[in-house]
Image (tube, rainbow, N blue to C red):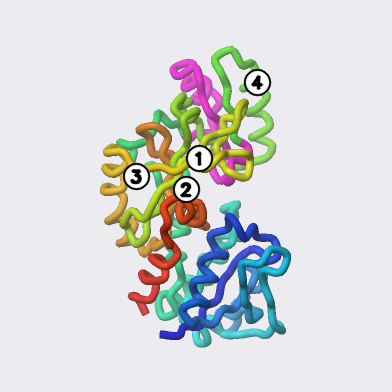
Amino acid sequence: MALTVAIQMDHVSSIDINGDSTFVLALEALRRGHTLLHYLPGDLAYRDGRVWAWVQPMEVRREAGNHFTLGEKFQIDLGQDTDVVLMRQDPPFDMAYITATHLLEMIHPETLVVNDPAEVRNAPEKLFVTRFAEFMPPTLIATNRDDILAFREEHKDIIVKPLYGNGGAGVFHLTPGDENLNSLLEMFTQMFREPIIVQAYLKDVRAGDKRIILVDGEVAGAVNRVPAAGESRSNMHVGGKPVKSELTARERDICAALGPELKDRGLIFVGIDVIGDYLTEINVTSPTGLQEINRFDGACLESMIWDAIEARR
């Protein structure tokens, strides 16, 4: 089954071929005989009832310094000229991101968009998780300063972060004696119009923040990410160390609760984050972790994802 696959992504020149999940998805697509087209979110356009994109034929290879080739740019009708669109640009989940989901929703599911763009729009990482509150740590989403101060008074040791942030950016750990909360709230108010999210600090993060990949609602693998010394964030691009990991009974319960809803929503490729016994995020925009899990487990998670995509075509 040869498919024409358009990948909406950040420019291929910017990716880390040893860590990027989009890269191995592209490699697997080529291995299966699919045709790849590369375009940026800014290349999308709506005209006369159709969704168009300026695309470039793309080939990728695991060769440092020479990992891609792009052909000449031309414009296509995404709904008529492609079979699959992978929506793989990184957040932030801002109005540009949301606009892209509206445009891609116009062609889905006749052209399969992964993940389903309407469900991506309806499932921002730090809000979608609230549907599974029984697995979450104590959490407040609010703008009102008194609400935030009361939460801090109750839980003492807290994490403060932007509601629509990503990659660990803007995440602050405030210990009970830290006097910077008021200044931090002033800064967040100036930078963001949205509420902020405040959570009880989980000491188990020192042992790692586990990324679990679910494919079509089923567990595919996991990797633990241990934060560097002096760092409360475990994201690998800020120094977190990937460590081989197995799922605990609690984590399997979490995945069993999430799986059916993820499948029903057309969220084929999802990465959830678990610290200790608590679910902290459900990542549906541009999840990562495939290459790390593959290396530790001798797996090929991108093959599982393509199996799920091809089953829908």
Circle nearer the N terminus (1, 2): 2
Label 2 packing within 10 angstroms: few (<14), some (14-19), many (20+): many
Cα–Cα span, label 1 and label 3: 25 Å
In the depicted structure, whether residue 112 falls above or below residue 232:
below
Circle nearer the N terminus (1, 3): 3
In the rendered image, which residue does mark 4 sit on? 180
Q: Is residue 164 visible?
A: yes
Residue 132, horizontal then vertical, whole percent = 33, 42
Name which residue type carries label 2: Glu
Left or right? Give the position of 275 relative to 145.
Answer: left
In the rendered image, which residue does mark 1 sit on? 225
Circle nearer the N terminus (2, 4): 2
- Whether residue 218 appears in magenta in the rendering, the answer is no
Cα–Cα span, label 2 and label 4: 26 Å
Circle nearer the N terminus (3, 4): 3
Q: Nearer the viewer, residue 169 or 184?
A: 169
In the depicted structure, whether residue 148 falls above or below residue 117:
above
- Whether residue 142 appears in magenta in the rendering, the answer is yes
Cα–Cα span, label 1 and label 2: 18 Å
The circle drawn on residue 131 is: 3
Residue ID at (46%, 30%): 207
In the depicted structure, whether residue 161 falls above or below residue 219:
above
Q: Nearer the viewer, residue 224 or 94?
A: 224
Q: Is residue 102 visible?
A: no
Name which residue type carries label 1: Arg
